[in-house]
Amino acid sequence: MEPLQLAGACRILVPLISGVARAQGMKQYSREVQSQAMFTLYNLCKVNKERQEQAARAGLVPHAQVIASTDGPLRQLAVPLLCDLAHAGRDARAELWRHGAVKTFIQLLEHGYWHSIALNALATWLTSETNPYYLEEELAKPECVDAVVECVDQSETATMASLLAPLLNMLQVST
């Protein structure tokens, strides 16, 4: 993975997941190109915060948000990748903020399969900020609070524990 990182793979792969291939007349290959680019980005970034930061700076966030909002197979890669960016570092979190990812994470709370990872991403983001006021302000909006309450209320007993730790972290950081 190191040679791909040094070659600037994130910079090259991010436009390929955005549908640029389709716009350039490669219609028959565009879905395959997008899938392969997404799989490669996922594998490059999954365990390496530096590559996550590179991908975020290369423009991954808005493209991953679009894919995460679909029910397609690439969603299985886009959601964890997007949520991992909250754990990556300051640059990645700045990109998440710039592209309104709080709303994306809140929307993911509605999906039982993703609610735990989305709430954990929000908690990590909030606890990692040196000045979390802007994020607290966004999360304090009634629609965000309602989504979190609904998420916890609708969760099954087995998944409740995975929600309580991030929720407690969020509440402890908030003023």
Image (spheres, rainbow, N blue to C red):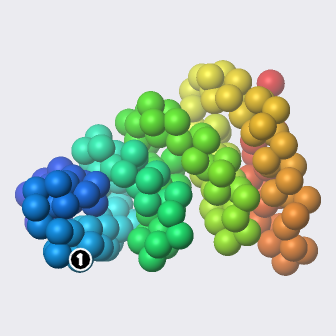
Mark 1 crowd level (few <14, some 14–19, many ≥20, 10 Å Cα) = few
The residue under the point 25% across, 44% down is: 58
Q: Amino acid at mark 1?
A: Glu
Residue 172 picture location, percent across and down:
80, 38
Residue 73 in the image: above or below residue 102: below
The residue under the point 45% across, 36% down is: 99
Asked whether, in this view, residue 58 is left or right of residue 153, the answer is left
**Pointer 1: what residue?**
32
Badge 1 element: helix
Residue 160 picture location, percent across and down:
85, 67
Q: Quadrant of residue 2?
A: bottom left
Nearest the viewer among 70 and 56 is 70
Asked whether, in this view, residue 27 is left or right of residue 145, the answer is left
Q: Quadrant of residue 92?
A: top left
Residue 113 in the image: above or below residue 67: below
Please indicate, yes or no, whether residue 93 appears anywhere in the rendered image: no
The residue under the point 76% across, 66% down is: 162
Nearest the viewer among 86 and 138 is 138
The residue under the point 86% across, 53% down is: 150
Residue 52 picture location, percent across and down:
35, 53
Total labels: the figure holds 1
Q: Quadrant of residue 33?
A: bottom left
Asked whether, in this view, residue 100 is left or right of residue 133, the answer is left
Residue 31 in the image: above or below residue 54: below
Residue 13 picture location, percent across and down:
20, 59
